[in-house]
Amino acid sequence: MTFEDFENATRESISARRNHLIALWAGKKIGLSSEALQQYALEVHHADYEEAGCEDVVRKVTADMRDANLNIDPKIVRLNLHRAEVEAQNELAQTD
């Protein structure tokens, strides 16, 4: 494994964990059951492959929350996404 491969795998792990954490945050606010939360986390993770960057995740989570009659500003979603990424980075650092 090259250093570049390692960096790519690390970024992918952080993104996947970030997406899971933001999905749990949003899903709980929406009122999803624990079973539905896991499915929702997969949906959010898949949404992340629509385009480069995290705006696809922001759009999905914001739209889903609005569909659940939660008026949320995308800035709040971005803030929580950033917090989830920091948490994911910290979790990964603890496993090294």
Image (spheres, helix red, strand yellow):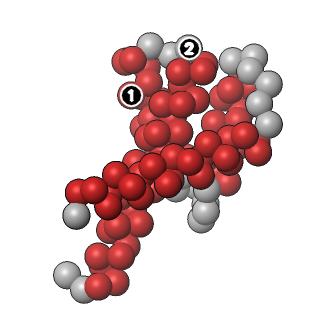
Q: Quadrant of the C terminus?
A: bottom left
Label 2 packing within 10 angstroms: few (<14), some (14-19), many (20+): few
Q: Residue at x 56, y 14 (%)?
A: 31
Q: CA distance from mark 2 to mark 1?
A: 13 Å
Q: Is residue 61 above or below residue 57?
A: above
Which residue carries the number 2 mark? 31
- In percent of width and height, residue 40 lies at 47, 30
Dot 2 and dot 1 residues touching (CB under 8 Å): no
Q: In front here: 49 or 69?
A: 69
Question: For the residues carrying marks 2 and 1, which lies nearer the camera in this image?
Answer: 2
Q: Residue at x 29, y 76 (%)?
A: 6
Q: Is residue 18 above or below residue 71?
A: below
Q: Secondary structure at mark 1?
A: helix
Q: In front here: 90 or 51?
A: 90
Q: In front here: 65 or 80?
A: 80
Which of the 4 image quadrants contains residue 90?
A: bottom left
Q: Quadrant of the N terminus?
A: bottom left
Which of the 4 image quadrants contains residue 74?
A: top right
Q: Residue at x 44, y 13 (%)?
A: 33
Q: Which mark is residue 38?
A: 1
- In percent of width and height, residue 81 lies at 59, 47
Q: Secondary structure at mark 2?
A: loop
Q: Residue at x 51, y 35 (%)?
A: 23
- In percent of width and height, residue 37 lies at 44, 24
Q: In front here: 95 or 18?
A: 95
Label 2 sits on what residue type?
Gly
